[in-house]
Image (cartoon, rainbow, N blue to C red):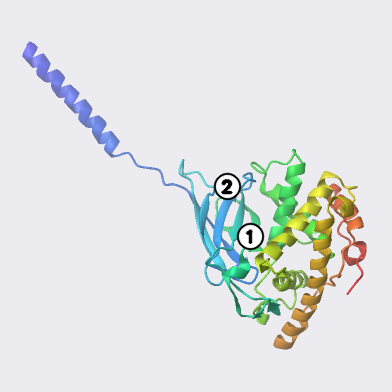
Amino acid sequence: MKNLLRTTLAAAIGLSLTACGSSENNIIPFTKATLDVQGDAIKGALGNALVEVFAASDTDFSDVLASGQTNADGTYSVTLNNTESAAPITGTYITRVTADADTTMICDAPMCGDVERGGVVPAADLAGLTLSTMSYSDGTTVDADVNLLTTMATDTILASVAENDAITLADITLEQVVELQKSATQVVGATLGINLTDANIYDVEIVDASVSANVSLTDEIAATLTLINASVASLDSADDQSLGQAIAAYTAAIKTITSAIFADEDADLGAVAPAAVAILNSVQMQIDTVVDTLAAEINQDVDGDLPVLEIPNEIDADKLGDLIGDIIHGTGATGGTGATGATGN
């Protein structure tokens, strides 16, 4: 009887262990969620540039969620992975594109230093260039184009968040992201002296202006912003400064100015940010001139008439605080070139 009991018990234990092993071996792993982020990096088309994606709340850009490189034509696609679950990857993200030792750019201005429009700007001239954009994911593929204007708007949003504890980028909704984008668009318009009241820079099709046929002959905002995006490739730079560093100095100046206004709408920009104001107006004059020249070239190429907004050659820094204050409080728009106190073409 004892032997029978032992035999029966051993058999039962063996079956139990076999069943457990079978269960473990047949566990079906979950399918990890992924998110594709794709777009065009256009400041001229940036080829072989570093692409990095961050959570928008990671304002120190310390945790890279996905990375890759742009193709020769500036297009890119990178993939985020959810290693914890199969839940869709959602939220707000910032994509940065940085020129490195392998990066080249197609010149989209009449001249980019010594390089003619359509030629290739070498990596050495692009050192210091970083562009960015902000986008929202509902779990499906994200289109995130990156250019000068999205960079200025993204910097504006980050400057606003830094001065406003009520805004938390970690958990904002799509609707809130769009509102931030539209407000930032108006602020960027104010710093350029143009009225972008009804626009969202992140939705505007800003294209590579090195090919004349690319530029819209029907969309005034798209044509204007495309030419502005292209124009900074002609910026004058100091002997010890690359084109990329000159562009970076301009976007940094804009961020300094908007940050000062967000902190104090009554700030005397000439006193608190004189260097930034000087860069703003030096570049504004060049933008005005280059946009006119580039528009004339494109019109001749396509036998058309680009619809381009009037761009002033100077921005009245004393009025920027009022203009941006109106945008912050929702009481007004940029007011176009007249409201900026510009001097005209």
Residue 197 visible in the picture: no
Q: The residue under label 2 is which amino acid type? A: Thr
Residue holding disc 1: 130
| Residue 169 in the figure: left or right of residue 12 | right
Q: Residue at x 24, y 33 (%)?
A: 21
N-term-proximal mark, 2 vs 1: 2
Vertical placement of 341 versus 332: above or below?
below
Residue 236 percent coordinates (x, y): 74, 71
Residue 342 percent coordinates (x, y): 91, 66
Q: Secondary structure at mark 1?
A: strand
Q: Which residue is more in the foreground, 273 or 39?
A: 273
Residue holding disc 2: 90
Looking at this view, name the residue that lies furthest to the front: 239
Circle 2 packing at 10 Å, graded few (<14), some (14-19), many (20+), is: few
Quadrant position of residue 211: bottom right
Q: Residue at x 72, y 69 (%)?
A: 237
| Residue 224 in the figure: left or right of residue 169 | right
Q: Quadrant of the N terminus?
A: top left
| Residue 29 in the figure: left or right of residue 87 | left
Residue 121 percent coordinates (x, y): 61, 74
Q: Secondary structure at mark 2?
A: loop
Q: Nearer the viewer, mark 2 or mark 1?
A: 1
